[in-house]
Image (cartoon, grey):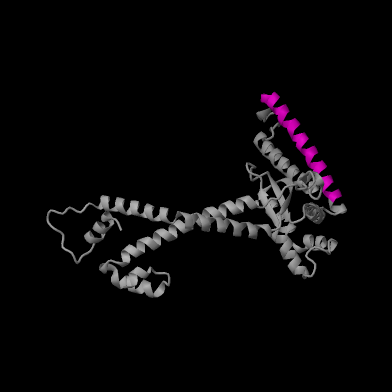
């Protein structure tokens, strides 16, 4: 042990009186502790590197058995926030997933329908496209699977099942279409009246002698706005279940979407390196602390609890 470290232990030992001319310099003591800690790590550098390499080899062996995961993605929308939440709930429901599972009996064979549905649901992911406004956003629906072709096929079947579930019945479609045509005609008439009133300002003033009272243009503009909103709602209802809500077909993934084996090995080696340094520093520091009578009661408790406590501190 270096003279600086011995001096540090002597100065912090309450059993030894400090001479009047002896000045305690805490910064120098901590600098000495740091340098001795670095020296301790350098003496164990070969062991640390060896254990780090063993951790990397072990991580590669484990990662080798991990199957590659492929992700098929399809883009949906635009959808309002409330409609998107409804769509997500419907897609993850049994009425949509169960027919898909029935079409692929080999999928998770040997498991019950509930287990298959739960597994398929756990591999589905629904996300809003970054930068999309919440009132009219584009969403991504993705499915993970170890087989890229199966991921695309399953996702296509799920999207088709969802569209079929929200598609309006033929009689409802006819009724919505008629309401939409009437709303569009009413909106066009209101737009013509408003435009005509704007061209003739004198028509906005009442003429009591002739019994003329002009329409309230503010109410007409408000009515036109409400009809326009209703037209949008009707259009969305008629559009439900059509492939206009889908931006292309689900993708066929070519590259795995899970972490590569190189990344797993690198992260494992870095984690092992940091963990070993922290372990050896803690072990070394506790060795110093264990030799100071001031901490004897606490050390006695730790000694009983920690089996790897330094042997030098047991005396």
Q: Dividing the image into 4 quarters, which one contains the C terminus?
A: bottom left
Q: Is residue 157 left or right of residue 198?
A: right
Dividing the picture into quarters, in which one does residue 15 lie? bottom left
Q: Is residue 40 left or right of residue 56?
A: left
Query: Which percent across, then down, holds residue 194?
Result: 71, 31
Tell whether 203 sits left or right of 163: left
| Magenta region | 173-202
The residue lying toward the viewer, choosing from 93 and 172, is 93
Q: Quadrant of the N terminus?
A: bottom left
Rendering coords of residue 206 (x, y %): 66, 30
Establish if 197 lies above or below 281.
above
How many marks can you see? 0
Answer whether residue 197 is magenta in the image.
yes
Most extreme residue toward the bottom is: 304
Outermost residue to the left: 20
Q: Position of residue 8 (x, y in %)?
A: 25, 57
Question: Magenta stretch: dominant SS?
Answer: helix
Q: Is residue 206 left or right of residue 19?
A: right
Q: Residue at x 42, y 69 (%)?
A: 308
**Residue drawn at x 74%, y 61% as measured from the top left:** 120
Question: From the viewer's perspective, is residue 193 above or below residue 309?
Answer: above
Q: Is residue 4 magenta?
A: no
């Amino acid at each position: 042990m270096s003279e600086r470290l011995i001096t540090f232990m002597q100065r912090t030992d309450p059993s030894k009186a400090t001479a009047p001319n002896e000045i305690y310099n805490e910064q120098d003591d901590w600098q000495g502790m740091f340098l001795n800690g670095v020296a301790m790590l350098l003496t164990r550098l070969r062991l640390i590197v060896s254990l780090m390499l063993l951790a990397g080899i072990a991580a590669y062996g484990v990662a080798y058995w991990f199957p590659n995961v492929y992700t098929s993605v399809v883009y949906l929308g635009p959808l309002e926030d409330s409609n998107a939440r409804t769509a997500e709930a419907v897609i993850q429901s049994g009425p949509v997933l169960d027919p898909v599972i029935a079409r692929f009996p080999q999928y998770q064979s040997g498991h019950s329908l509930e287990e298959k549905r739960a597994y398929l649901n756990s591999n589905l992911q629904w996300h809003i496209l970054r930068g999309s406004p919440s009132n009219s956003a584009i969403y991504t629906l993705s499915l993970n699977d170890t087989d890229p072709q199966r991921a695309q096929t399953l996702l296509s079947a799920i999207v088709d099942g969802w569209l079929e579930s929200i598609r309006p019945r033929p009689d409802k479609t006819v009724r919505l279409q008629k309401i939409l045509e009437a709303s569009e005609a009413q909106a066009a008439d209101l737009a013509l009246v408003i435009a005509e009133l704007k061209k003739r300002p004198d028509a906005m003033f009442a003429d009591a002698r002739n019994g003329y009272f002009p329409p309230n243009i503010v109410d007409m503009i408000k009515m036109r706005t409400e009809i326009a909103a209703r037209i949008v709602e009707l259009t969305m209802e008629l559009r439900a279940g059509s492939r206009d809500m889908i931006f292309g077909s689900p993708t066929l993934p070519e590259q795995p979407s899970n972490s590569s084996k190189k990344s797993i090995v690198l992260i494992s080696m870095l984690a092992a390196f940091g963990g070993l340094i922290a372990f050896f520093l803690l072990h070394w520091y506790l060795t110093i602390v264990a030799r100071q009578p001031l901490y004897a009661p606490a050390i006695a408790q730790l000694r009983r609890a920690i089996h790897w406590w330094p042997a030098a501190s047991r005396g």
